[in-house]
Amino acid sequence: MEIQWRKSSKSSNAEGSDCLELAEQGGEILMRESDNPDIVIRTTRAKLRAFLGGAKEGEFDDLA
């Protein structure tokens, strides 16, 4: 089964190469950079949810 990658509509350039892509496969969440698709990070929904919660609260704003 082919992985269905999704990327944000907020991608920062016309080619959409400045973004992270996400997919679900076998109960895991997969992440990759669109300009380097051979490296895939695997995580769980709970860990992604915790990260996104921290991002929404501004915990990583100093890195952007």
Image (spheres, grey):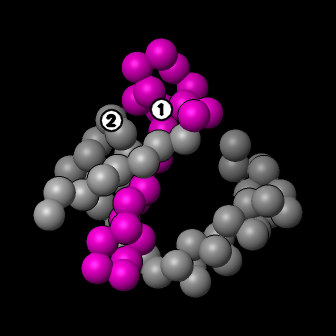
Disc 2 target residue: 35
Disc assigned to residue 8: none
Q: Amino acid at mark 2?
A: Asp
- Quadrant for residue 59, please give it: bottom right
- The residue sitting at the right extreme is 57
Across and down, in percent, residue 29 comes to 41, 71
Q: Secondary structure at mark 1?
A: loop
Q: Amino acid at mark 1?
A: Asp
- Label 2 CA crowd tier, 10 Å (few <14, some 14–19, many 20+): some
Residue at image point 33% right, 35% down: 35
- Quadrant for residue 43, please give it: bottom left
- Asked whether residue 62 is drawn in magenta, I would say no
Q: Read off the magenta span.
A: 9-31
Across and down, in percent, residue 21 comes to 42, 49
9 to 59, vertically: above or below? above
Q: Is residue 25 left or right of residue 19?
A: left
Circles 1, 2 touching at the beta carbon (< 8 Å) = yes
Across and down, in percent, residue 10 comes to 61, 33
Q: Where's the N terminus, which quadrant?
A: bottom left
Residue at image point 26% right, 46% down: 37
Disc assigned to residue 18: 1
- Looking at the image, is mark 1 or mark 2 earlier in the sequence? 1
30 to 9, vertically: above or below? below
